[in-house]
Image (cartoon, grey):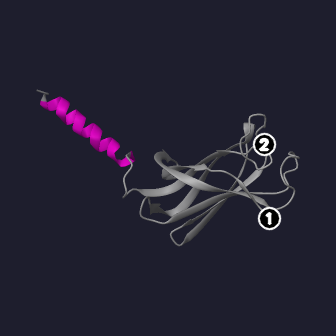
Amino acid sequence: MASPSSAAIFILFLLSTAWVLPSEAQLIKGLKVSGILYCSPDGNYCPTCQGLVGVNVTIFCNIGSNNYTTSALTGPGGIIDEVLGCGDGFFLGITPISCVATVQLPVLNCALLPTTGILQATLTLTGNLIVNLLGLCVKAFIGVFVHLTA
């Protein structure tokens, strides 16, 4: 049988960590967006393609009745790593969310990409939560890019 002090410590531990556990009622203050942009005919992975560095990626989300936008430059290896702040926040699993990442073409340092239009990819929320300076954020990853013509 556990001693009263070990049971109390365990209960305190549960209470102190419960606020970061995924829950349908958590107020989310942002999205942590990750992905990679490649120099390929469609911006997606290919075994011989390099990641594109220094390309502007716009992330747009419609969350509930609010629109949020941020821009990020791809880093080494074409990595996209950005946090999109969501104002007053939203409730994960309750508030409707629709997000995309776009890249305006042409991209000067990649001759394989089309020269007109945009690349667009849907963001997928993982449900994994992290805490950063904004507060509680949900992780999202950029899906497959599709070429859209104007």
- Which residue sits at x=46%, y=47%? 129
Q: Quadrant of residue 91?
A: bottom left
Label 2 environment density (alpha carbons within 10 Å; few <14, some 14–19, many ≥20): many
Q: Are marks 2 and 1 in contact (CB under 8 Å)?
A: no
Q: Nearer the viewer, residue 58 or 111?
A: 111
The secondary structure making up most of the magenta span is helix
- Which residue sits at x=54%, y=61%? 86
Label 1 environment density (alpha carbons within 10 Å; few <14, some 14–19, many ≥20): few
Figure check: 96 above or below 29? below
Quarter of the picture holding the C terminus: bottom right
Label placed on residue 52: 2
Element on which disc 1 rests: loop
- Region rendered in magenta: 4-20
Q: Quadrant of residue 57?
A: bottom right
Label placed on residue 25: none
Tell me the distance, in whole angstroms, between the alpha carbons under discs 2 and 1.
21 Å
Quarter of the picture holding the N terminus: top left
Where does residue 11 sit, x and y in percent of width and height? 22, 39
Q: Which callout, 2 or 1, points at the residue further toward the start of the chain?
A: 2
| Residue at mark 1 | 149
Say if the magenta span includes residue 83. no
